Image (tube, rainbow, N blue to C red):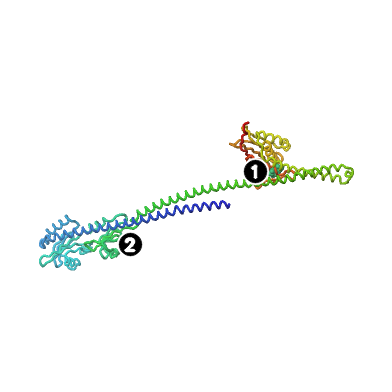
Amino acid sequence: MMKTAIYSKLQKKIISVTLLVSLAPLLLLGVTIYYQFARMYRTKVQEQLQYRAWAQAEAMDLFLKERTAILAAMADTHTFNEMIEEKILGSIFSVMNVRAGAFVDLGVINNAGQQLAYVGPYELRGLNYYQQEWFGEVMSKGIYISDVYLGYRQLPHFIIAVRRQEGQNPWILRATIDPAVFGALVRSAQVGKTGDAFIVNEAGVYQTRPRFGGQILTESGLDTRLFGGSTSLMELKTQDGVAMLYAGSWLKKHNWLLLIRQEAAEEMGGLFTTRNVEIAIILSGILAIVLATVFTTQLMVNQLRESDRRMNGLNAQLVQSDKLAAIGKMAAGVAHEINNPLAVILQKTGWMEDLLQTEDLKSSENLDEFKTSIRKIEEHVERARKVVHGMLGYARKMEPRLEDVDINDTLKQTTSLLNNFARINNIVIRTDLAPDLPILASDQAQLQQVFLNLISNAIDAIGKNGVVQISSIRSEDEVHISISDNGRGIPEEAHKKVFDPFYTTKQSGKGTGLGLWISYNIIEKMGGTITLASKEGEGTTFTVKLPIVVPEKK
Ligand SMILES: Nc1ncnc2c1ncn2[C@@H]1O[C@H](COP(=O)(O)OP(=O)(O)OP(=O)(O)O)[C@@H](O)[C@H]1O
Ligand SMILES: [Mg+2]
């Protein structure tokens, strides 16, 4: 549990460092590129808008200039008396429309404001313009272009007028410009879904009809003073809060401001598409990085965990074999020390037994008491000797003798030793031996001791009625011998302990607890392993693995 927490903490650390290191520059780069691009894009859009306003203002200037020039040329080349001839005026009018166009009507007005001659669709002949604002302007300035107004005809229009001086009497040639033609020309500058192009006068009154939200001669609500210089750019909000880009350019011929208006969002539409594409690319990049990081760290941590686990297993094995070796040395020493006193005790007990045969002791009323005590002593000394011999035997035979050993033969011999005992208890010993086992260079007596202990343990674990299965197989460079029983099994917590010396669950006097300890040491000395798999209540399998050491050819 602790370990798992350590691994996931490690993984989290690696992931966060990797992500930080890789994502931070990615995001920084993305944001930087976006802002650079946005700045460039915005400048480009604004420049373009401004250029369009400027170019359209130039076109409108040219339009007015041409019309003014042709009107002045006509006035210059004709006398007042010719002009008031309506036939001549009519032909001048048609020449002007052929050469320049967009003229609605043409009139000649004397210095008293009286329109003496008129060609055009309205009944304006004989009207007096003395009171009109433009009349004063043209009389004083010589050339005048009006703002749009309603006039006698009660229709929005504007006029171009030139004054001529013939002797003492100035007169005026005046033409009306077709507002439809003029307006259409202005509107040719509008683009896109929200684009608009129109002209306002200094007071902000529409001089041409805008595409959205207004009529000619109504207030636009724009403060034209904001538009300084010849061409300028402005971002203003509408009443509904929509951001609008305005490019304004003042006409040179007249105090008119040509405006091109566009929704900022539409102008920046390309930018938003680019931004979304960039975000999508960066997001998928991030996703890929995150997935790759999680995947690789998972792989790494799993490997680490696996190798840690293997290492721990090896460590445990080492500790186990170290412990057993140390105990073994000590036990052998102790056994040796006890061996001699035991011999003396046994000898003296025999002597005491002999003494009981003598006359005076035979008549003792405690004779039986003595006899049972002596038998008990002998019995227990015998048991002690068994233990001591086991340990000494093991100590003496530490180094295996090498001889040709047929594992299957050894197993069969061992089985035959135990067969009778097994049959009495209704236990079947089955063998399944691989026919192709090689002859090993090993110690037959020691192996027999091991097998004998394993098989008798199996029989003991069953008690009565059961099966012991003995099998051998060859696996690459090892021989595996397994002894299984369907006895009571070994509880998980005892798996480590069964190899300890003197660990036994058998009744006192029945088992010494040395069998597996000796077996373990023997097999280890041979370079093999002995392992167990067991489930409580179901059975146990001990497996001995011996390296294949082939005897030298003699
Ligand atoms: N096949 C098995 N099934 C169940 N328990 C086993 C099996 N083999 C060993 N044991 C357990 O391991 C203990 C130790 O075994 P070990 O062979 O070392 O000593 P023992 O059999 O008790 O005594 P001894 O071998 O001197 O007769 C046994 O007492 C028993 O509890
Ligand atoms: Mg045993």
Q: Disc 1, ligand 1: is the CB inside 8 Å? A: yes
What residue appears at the point 58 percent right and 47 percent down from the top-left corner? 311
Q: Earlier in the sequence, mark 1 or mark 2?
A: 2
| Residue 512 percent location from the top left of the image | 72, 44
**Front residue of this view, candidates 323 and 493:** 323
**Front residue of this view, candidates 66 and 510:** 510
Residue 236: which numbered mark, if any?
Answer: 2
**Label 1 to label 2, Cα distance in Å?**
86 Å
Judged left or right of residue 105, residue 378 is right
| Element carrying mark 2 | strand
Report the amino acid beneath label 1.
Answer: Ser
Residue where numbered disc 1 is placed:
534
Q: Residues within 10 Å of mark 2 (few under 14, many from 20)?
A: some
Q: Please identify the quadrant where the C terminus is shown.
A: top right
Judged left or right of residue 102, residue 491 is right
| Relative to 53, residue 327 above or below | above
Q: Residues within 10 Å of mark 1 (few under 14, many from 20)?
A: many
**Front residue of this view, candidates 218 and 21:** 21
